[in-house]
Image: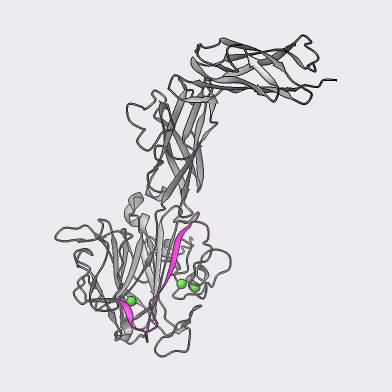
Amino acid sequence: MTLAFAVPFLTRAFALTDVGNAGVFELDGNIVKDSSGTFPTDWGALFDSSGVTQPLPQGALDAHWVNDGPHAVTDLTTFTTGSKDTLDIANAGWQCTPSGNLTPKDDILHAYSLAIVPQSGPRMGHLLVYGGFERFTNNGAGDLGLWLLQDPAVACSSTKGAVSFTGAHVVGDVLFVGEFSTGGTVTTLNAFKWVGGSSPLANVTATGGADCRTANITANFCSRSNTVSISTPWSTQDKTSGPNTLATAEFFEVGIDLTGLFGSNAPCINRFIFDTRTSPSVTATLKDYAEGELATCPTAAISTNVSPSPIPFGGSATDTATVTLTTASTVSGTVTFNVYGPFSSPPTSTSCTSTTLVTPFSPNTVTIGPGPSPQSATSGTFTPSATGYYGWTATYNPAGPRNGNTVSTSCGDANETLLVLSIPKITAFDFTNTPDNSDPTLGSGTVMYTFKIHNYGAAVTLSGSLAVSGTASVTCTGGNTLTLSGSLAADTDATFSLTCTYSGTSGQNVSATINAMFTDTNGATHSVSGTPTTYTFTIQTI
Ligand SMILES: [Ca+2]
Ligand SMILES: [Ca+2]
Ligand SMILES: [Ca+2]
């Protein structure tokens, strides 16, 4: 005989405590962090008692806390009655006005936001956004909207009369509209995206849930309100409770998996707006709002350094680009280096053109990252074929918007100039003193200076001088200054000499100094290297 057991198949084993059980946030209907360890976190761990954002846990991109109270103070951020979800923000579609008489159940006290990419768990790598707000009383269902906006310029505040919002909708802006009961159960929550046109709001049909306690584990959004009285870590005053206490259904929080809803092309959010309204409809009359920052995509900055510079002709250099992101995000993509030149003087902002682009080296594209910000990438090795100044530019091409935006250095930027020098060098400088070459102590004699310049690089034109002077009387053949001139071909020597007679008494001296310059084929003039460049002797008679 066989005994068969019927095993119940559980379609929903337990209430979700995070959207999709991501495990990074407590969607538990309260504000304090109840768990131990870093995750799951909660609002009370992200902000201090003044609302200042604390160091964010791993994977978190951004978090902000907004004060929109207290109730007794005139609220400068409430919607005019004409403002609608279905209107564009621009062209006076949305307007704000001050209100000292908000309906208590519609008055938002604080609002907060968090964007995070879990580093492990079932939603690993997904872009998750959380939002929460507090309201003044619970005498009536809570009807709310949450806009996730891409335009960072969206803002409005008025101390008197209707004022139009700055900023505008961008296709892909996301709207959530919902309602929670006086008992703290979220009864409806729907997602829309801004598509523009005559029917500007489109339903987002991907799976979602209203209350996380009853949402499916596959839900890409769910929310909670508080079913019991809860405390706040910051100063809050509702209508009926003691300080820093919220009565049932005065708190709402939501978790959203933007990657689950929109795939890897989730919009780059820059602002969040919680609002209260007359119903969970996109045509509802809008009441209070609280707006703040929430950056889900970082802004990239790039800095570069060409090294080494200057280099001798025949040498090589590389450029290193460092990409830094404004949030703790992953740098990933490529960096494209371009070299322009050669120029006779340091390049300026207008020097880098298609005709000065050095090919085939340019464009030189290398991989950067993936890795946590900042990351660096070094160009291929550039070996110039001519002397002169070269200007580099570098462009970061992110793999996706979550890796930052495309950003470039500008032509003529600091640390982006490479100088390639010919290297004429003083290789010999000496003098002979006659009659006694080894004893320059006679009161008079003849001195002959000789020196040699060798050109290790491309052809140059020499200039400058050898100048002889002194406190002793000194006269040189052809004058006391020997002017250097003439071209010096690659890998050749130029030899110069000057003969002088001198006479003087003890303590007087004779001095010779080389001041040699060269001009390269690009017209740039530099000093000839090499030492010594000066010889001085002192007369010591007995
Ligand atoms: Ca919570
Ligand atoms: Ca909690
Ligand atoms: Ca407000």
Exactly how many numbered labels are in the figure? 0
User: Is residue 188 inside the magenta stretch?
Assistant: no
- In percent of width and height, residue 46 lies at 50, 68
- In percent of width and height, residue 253 lies at 40, 72
In the figure, 436 relative to 162: above or below? above
Q: Is residue 531 visible?
A: no
| Front residue (pair 531, 266) | 531
| Front residue (pair 478, 91) | 478
- In percent of width and height, residue 51 lies at 48, 72
In the figure, 459 relative to 340: above or below? above
| Colouring style | one colour
Left or right: 334 as drawn, with respect to 261: right
- In percent of width and height, residue 172 lies at 27, 56
Q: Residue at x 77, y 11 (%)?
A: 437
Q: Residue at x 51, y 23 (%)?
A: 421
| Front residue (pair 103, 20) | 103
Left or right: 24 as drawn, with respect to 294: right
Q: Residue at x 36, y 27 (%)?
A: 356
Q: Residue furthest left?
A: 198
User: Is residue 64 inside the magenta stretch?
Assistant: yes
Left or right: 315 as drawn, with respect to 82: right
Q: Is residue 44 visible?
A: yes
Q: Quadrant of residue 203?
A: bottom left
Q: Quadrant of residue 74?
A: bottom left
Quadrant containing the C terminus is top right
In the figure, 521 relative to 124: above or below? above
Range covered by the magenta-colored residues: 57-77
